[in-house]
Image: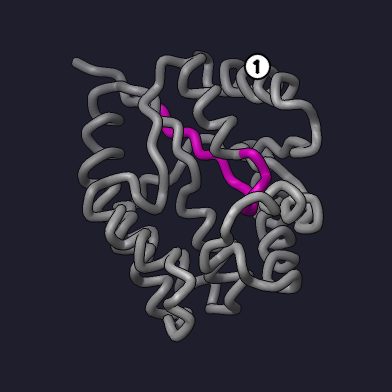
Amino acid sequence: MTTAGRYIALEGIEGCGKSTQAVRLAESLGAVLTRETGGTPIGQRIRDVLHDPANTHLSPVAEALLIAGDRAQHRAEVLAPNLDAGRIIVSDRSVHSSIAYQGYGRGLDLESVRRINDWALDGRWPDLVVLIDIEHDEALKRLAHRDLDRFEREGADFFRRIVDGFRAMAQADPARWLVVDGTRPIDELAGRILEHVRSTLGL
């Protein structure tokens, strides 16, 4: 008999440092590291469409459905088998990014976004969410050295709505969410996140 695994998600806007912290946390826990979108071969092809800056005509609804499709494939290939085997999963983004980006950011109906993604996940949402909180102005400074993708090229108002959305979700479910200041040093953040994850999930 196996023990059900644990599912931890790192969230935040581009440039917040979540990818770095996801790697650090997964290494510390000996966990499976994954990401959404693009955590499977099929998902990577979907990600290429979503992030291509040439795709300026992609509708918000089509965007949301593509991401939900990626999520369904990710659940089938990564989440379900690893959680059923009792493993810990650390994911760079999760369903909460869809609510923040397509719901709050794009202005799609929040309940519709939740419902389609709950179906994609077969009801299996993250056990714990770590929000690396940072303002868009600071994130832009960190992204200045690279070519921006389709999402990163969006304006300040779009990201302001996303930041507000993430904060609203965290405030509504404090037992599941940890909010950390993304401007703090990397090692300090990693230690704070690891301590909280271990104590909260009993790892």
Q: Residue placed at 75% from the left, 39% from the top?
A: 182
**Please, is residue 46 above or below residue 91 in the view?**
below
Residue 73: x and y, percent?
A: 24, 53
Q: Residue placed at 65% from the left, 48% from the top?
A: 15
Does residue 92 show up magenta in the picture? no
Q: Residue placed at 71% from the left, 47% from the top?
A: 142
Mark 1 falls on what kind of element? Answer: helix
Q: Nearer the viewer, residue 93 or 7?
A: 93
Residue 107: x and y, percent?
A: 60, 78
Q: Residue placed at 23% from the left, 49% from the top?
A: 41
- Part of the protein shown in magenta: 6-17
**Please, is residue 122 above or below residue 109 in the view?**
above
Residue 65: x and y, percent?
A: 36, 71
**Please, is residue 127 above or below residue 167 in the view?**
above
Residue 30: x and y, percent?
A: 41, 15
State the residue position of label 1: 195
Does residue 10 show up magenta in the picture? yes
Residue 79 left/right relative to 76? right
